[in-house]
Amino acid sequence: MTRRVLFVCLGNICRSPAAEGVVRAMAGDRLRLDSAGTSDWHRGNPPYRPMIDAAARRGIDLRGLRARQFTRRDFLDFDLIVPMDPDNRADIERLRPEGATTPVHLFTDYAPEAGMNHVPDPYYTRDFEATLDLIEICAAGLMRDLF
Ligand code: 4NP
C-alpha cells in the first residue's frame, strides 16, 4: 500500500514543498511525506518566502521544511515519487537503480480535468496563487487515487 510519497521539483523551494504541505493538510497521518529537488541549489534552505506567504494565506505552514537533493536511494525509501514537470521526471528516471520498480507519476496526472502536463514554476511565472490553485486540484486527485 502507498504510504510514503515524495514530491520532486527543481529547486525544492517552491512547488514540491507546497505540494507536500497541501497534501499533508489533506492526508494527516495517513501518509508519510517528503519533498526533494533534482538540483542541490537550495540545500538546507527553507521554502522561498513568497511561497511560504502564499501558502500561509491558505492555512498551510511551510516554514519548517528544508530543501534537499533527490538521490537514487529515494527509489527505495518511497512507495511513490511525484515530479512536478516532465523535466523533473526525466532527471529522476536517469537515477533509477537497476530493478527498482517504484512508480513515478506526474502530479498533474492526478488531475486530468486541469488539462496540464506540468505544475508551472512560480519562481519564474511569479504567479504563486495559480500554482497553488493547481497544486490543490492535483492534491485532491491524488487523495482520490490513494484512498
Ligand atoms: P521549484 O522552483 O523547482 O518549484 O523549487 C525553483 C526555485 C529556484 C530555482 C528554480 C526553480 N532557481 O533557479 O534557483
Image: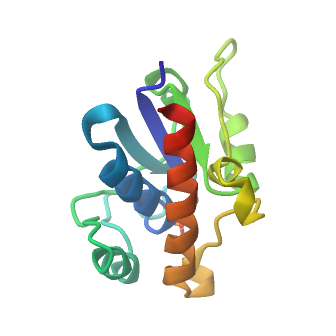
Q: Residue at x 75, y 64 (%)?
A: 116
- Residue 101, image x and y in percent? 66, 18
Name the residue nearer the viewer: 4 or 22.
Answer: 22
Q: Is residue 47 above or below residue 37?
A: below
Q: Residue at x 75, y 53 (%)?
A: 86
Q: Is residue 144 above or below residue 123?
A: above
- The residue sitting at the bottom extreme is 126
Q: Residue at x 28, y 76 (%)?
A: 56
Q: Residue at x 56, y 61 (%)?
A: 137
Name the residue nearer the viewer: 111 or 102.
Answer: 111
Give left or right: position of 93 versus 39. Answer: right
- Residue 139, image x and y in percent? 50, 53
- Residue 7, image x and y in percent? 50, 47
Total labels: the figure holds 0
Q: Is residue 44 above or below residue 34?
A: below
- Residue 104, image x and y in percent? 65, 35
Residue 39 appears in the picture as rendered: no
Q: Which quarter of the frame holds ligand 1?
A: bottom right
- The residue sitting at the top extreme is 99
